[in-house]
Image (cartoon, helix red, strand yellow):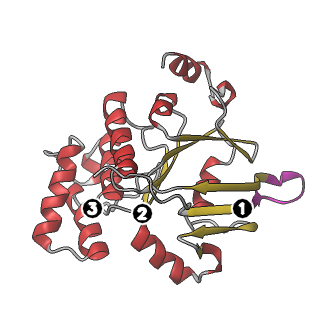
């Protein structure tokens, strides 16, 4: 069923977020008094030039990196007032993550990477976990790769396994850092459609860090982070792109 958007309250709210790294002359302010509200059923993009603080903001909002100041409320629960154990339990129950570095377990096959999430995170039986894992692998074009381990997969294939692992648990929140970076656009577009469906059909709250301008038409909202300052709805913000290839891709939309 298509998510009708009837819930108008944000599922994630943050304000006053500041984060810096280093000291003295080497100190860099990654986030400068950032505030944001994210809603269920929306697929949001976070864009900006390299080094602008995008990955830092994603990590702070998802409970992986402690801010210097500010608050993050997810389902009206203050992430940074929780203990580390409470945050881990919250992420396990409610969050899906797609990292640039894949973060796959070397000893597990592609199928087992997905089965593990369903068996230990969702309590599914072995047979049901296998069925759903095979279904997700097929959707991602990996039906014949289920028995292979990460070292036997290409970079793009590993990225698709990581994406499947995040999506298969039907998370309330999904945070993705450059999910299409290792993919050709055929597979990249497929992934974007899956992410958008997770928002529109299931009501998930999705935030994606991206450089790929081809993702913009698929997004419900676009945020732009530059030098630690966040803005929303910048019309065709050409300064966000790192080089002329990105600009050309954006202009081709």
Q: Is residue 200 left or right of residue 175?
A: left
Q: Earlier in the sequence, mark 1 or mark 2?
A: 1
Q: Earlier in the sequence, mark 3 or mark 2?
A: 3
Quickly name the residue at label 1: 15
Kind of element beneath mark 2: loop
User: What's the mark number on residue 113?
Assistant: 3
Residue 70 highlighted magenta (yes or no): no
Label 1: few (<14), some or many (≥20) within 10 Å?
some
Number of numbered callouts drawn: 3
What is the spatial separation of the Cα atoms under label 3 and label 2, in whole angstroms? 20 Å
Residue 26 highlighted magenta (yes or no): yes
Give the vertical position of 24 relative to 241 (above or below).
below
Residue at position x 47%, y 30% in the image: 217
Residue at position x 54%, y 22% in the image: 250
Residue 51 in percent (x, y) is at 68, 42
What is the spatial separation of the Cα atoms under label 3 and label 1, in whole angstroms? 35 Å
Label 3: few (<14), some or many (≥20) within 10 Å?
many
What is the spatial separation of the Cα atoms under label 1 and label 2, in whole angstroms? 21 Å
Quickly name the residue at label 2: 172
Kind of element beneath mark 3: helix
Give the vertical position of 70 relative to 138 (above or below).
below
Instruction: Please state which of the two labelled residues, at mark 3 or mark 2, is closer to the viewer.
Output: 2
Q: Earlier in the sequence, mark 3 or mark 1?
A: 1
Q: Is residue 226 left or right of residue 25?
A: left
Residue 17 in percent (x, y) is at 73, 61
Looking at the rendering, the stretch of residues picked out in magenta corresponds to 15-28
State the image quarter where residue 82 is shown.
bottom right
Residue 136 in percent (x, y) is at 22, 52
Instruction: Please state which of the two labelled residues, at mark 3 or mark 1, is closer to the viewer.
Output: 1
């Amino acid at each position: 069923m298509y998510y009708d958007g009837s819930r108008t309250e944000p599922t994630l709210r943050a304000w006053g977020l500041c984060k810096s790294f280093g000291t003295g002359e080497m100190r860099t302010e990654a986030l400068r008094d950032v505030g944001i509200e994210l809603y269920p059923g929306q697929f949001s993009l976070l864009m900006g030039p390299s080094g602008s603080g995008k990955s830092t903001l994603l990590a702070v909002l998802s409970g992986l990196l402690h801010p210097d100041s500010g608050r993050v409320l997810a389902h009206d629960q203050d992430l940074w007032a929780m203990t580390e154990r409470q945050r881990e339990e919250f992420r396990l129950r409610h969050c899906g993550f797609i990292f640039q570095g894949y973060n796959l377990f070397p000893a597990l096959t592609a199928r087992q990477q997905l089965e593990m999430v369903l068996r230990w995170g969702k309590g599914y039986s072995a047979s049901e976990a296998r069925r759903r894992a095979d279904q997700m692998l097929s959707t991602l074009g990996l039906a014949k790769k289920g028995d292979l381990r990460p070292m036997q997969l290409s970079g793009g294939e590993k990225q698709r396994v990581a994406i499947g692992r995040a999506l298969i648990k039907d998370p309330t929140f999904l945070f993705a850092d450059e999910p299409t970076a290792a993919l050709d656009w055929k597979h990249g577009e497929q992934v974007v459609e899956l992410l958008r469906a997770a928002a529109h059909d299931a009501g998930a709250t999705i935030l994606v860090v991206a450089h790929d301008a081809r993702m913009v038409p698929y997004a419900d909202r676009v945020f732009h982070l530059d030098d630690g300052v966040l803005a929303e709805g910048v019309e065709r913000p050409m300064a966000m792109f790192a080089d002329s290839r990105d600009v050309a891709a954006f202009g081709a939309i």
